[in-house]
Image: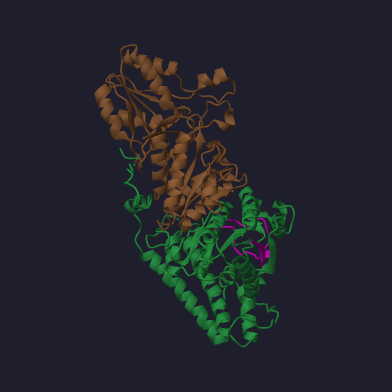
Chain colours: A green, B brown
Amino acid sequence: MVGEDPGVAVAEPKAAALSLSPDQQIALYRQMVRIRRFEEKAAQAFMRAEIKGFCHLYIGEEAVAVGALSALEQRDAVITAYRDHGVALARGTSARACMAELLGKRTGCSKGMGGSMHLFDRAHHFYGGHAIVGSHTAVAAGLAFAQQYENTGGITLCLLGDGAMNQGVVSETLNLVSLWRLPIVFLIENNEYAMGTSVARSSAGLPLVNRGSAFDMAGRTANGMDVEDVRASVAEAVSLARTEHLPTLLEVKTYRYRGHSMSDPDTYRTKQEIAEQKKNDPIFLYRKRLEERRILTEDLAKQIDDEARAEAQDALTFAEQSPEPDLELAFSLLFSPEDRIDPVPRPRYSDI
Amino acid sequence: MAKITYRQALNQALAEEMERDPAVFLMGEEVGEYQGAFKVSQGLLQRFGPKRVVDTPISEAAFSGVGVGAALYGLRPVVEFMNWSFSFVAFDQLVNNVGSLRFMSGGQFDLPIVFRGPSGGGTQIGATHSHCPESWFAGVPVLTVVSPAFPEDAKGLLKSAIRSNNPVFFFEGERLYGLEGEVPDAEFLTPIGQARICREGGDLTIVSGGYSTHTALSAAGALAADGKEADVIDLRTIKPYDFDRIAKSVQKTNRLLIVEENKPFAGWGAQIAYDIQHRLFDWLDAPILRVTGLDIPQPYNAKLEGQVLPNVERILAAARQLLA
């Protein structure tokens, strides 16, 4: 059984998604389970102080990254905020490279320089994990600008939290992308809380998706606990971006079961609220749905879960056994080699 | 050699590099239809079109971030700040993103981007428009900080900055845009990290940069009337600065005066003074002195602003103190 299982069957039977084959539906399910098991393993590693600093878990929000990224092509760009483990995994970054980064190891996807909040994977067009709230939305617009400039046909998906919507740079960026008709989708992962401050206590003009209308952006909402609903909404927004060069602001309602980060005592909401939300667990609901569609058997579900557990354990073992980076490596990452001008001297001013 | 203005030199550098590489584009407030707030981009929109000469709203944080994203993707943005003092609303993009993304991604992404525009005072536009943030940005480990004083270097350094695979913060001077100087007709690049010797003398070394180089040169001329001759070194690149060139001069003159327009506390001259005392202690015959902007916000009043900026009188007084 999947972790965090509320044990209550509330899944609504839905018609099979038109465009999703049984294999695709299984793949969505498998991806969510992978992320859940990875995050549970990360939580354990954090409790054992193998992971230090901040560690923001994606548990409860799996359907958002999995559904959204399943609607993209490989050439598209993905960028997100600091709750980035699930996004990186859904984009194709290996569990080993992600876990090794959480442990600060040389084999991590950012060579141990970034940590939990700063996962990057160029090969998969994943432009990071960004930890200054709202800051990356402007960078995302730059990715979309470059895609348009180079006429690649690609689009950019930028995930951001509900809290980011109150940063000035986000409003500036929404204006720019609409003005310039950039091929981009902004997906607000509204998990109800910006750290410990609820949306209601931080934001006027709700729902947040309304903010886009001030800039003539297309606006959509989706149920972030329903992976197929997220996928369908993102697919529409992606199509608008790709074919019409129209940006969309998409608000996806979701919920995180764990604290803001591992160091959050979670005192700003009740246990009842969390328990109530867990009835909408995206993995549990999707499993029920796939069982009703007779796509997923108990055996297959168990096999998927076993594989996800094994993958997470393998990732942690790999990370534990990986070497630490050293200062030599760190200094080597500062500058790109020059190949169009004479080498620039790069003294270390800290040297004595 | 043709005699052109500093403004025209920058314009030529932009045009040549945009001609050379389709990935280079210019973005900022009023760079296109307005032809540039200081006419640095005059004619570029007509020549390269709106795709590559991009007018932005007044949104420094957003368009700086757009530059970052475009650079991550492989383009070579030149982002203009109408005034470097306006860059502060984009400080997060400049310090956190430009300053960290290559490193923090384990070296996966390059940031071939230039941020440029005028900095400094002297035009009576008050405290909010007269900052010299060169030293602030030089405090970020990966940033290269360039500040040419002459048209030739403005052109050669901007071309180098655009071709660099690393982020370059390029500081021009509003008071320098109309300055004329000889610029080679043939294609040339000025190397990043090399100082220029503007005047030679054996009694004293004066190190300066940007507009202050010209003030230092005026002071050196006045000093000659005392029978004292100064080496005047124009840094051209603030970071990494040309330690070897300064050291060579100090080993000849044994006296160092630093002239910098920024405020005194932790200005770039403090770093140079530290390095020289640390590595050439035995070569110095007098304490290193710095003439900086006075330690107050920039006043509007003309007479006061003239006193706040490094001026010939204060440089001469410091030089005489060093030579006494």
Question: What predominant SS class does the magenta segment belong to?
Answer: loop
Closest to the observer, A286 or B261 = B261
Residue B39 image position (x, y, % from top left): 54, 38
Residue A133 appears in the rendering: no
Above or below residue B134? Residue B162 is below
Closest to the observer, A62 or A240 = A240
Closest to the observer, B210 or A329 = B210
Residue B28 image position (x, y, % from top left): 56, 45
Disc count in the image? 0
Above or below residue A299? Residue A55 is above
Above or below residue B198? Residue A332 is below
- Residue at 69% x, 62% y: name it: A218
- Residue at 39% x, 48% y: name it: B164
Q: Which residues are magenta?
A: A247-275
Looking at the image, residue B3 sits to the left or right of residue B90; the answer is left
Looking at the image, residue A195 sits to the left or right of residue B69; the answer is right
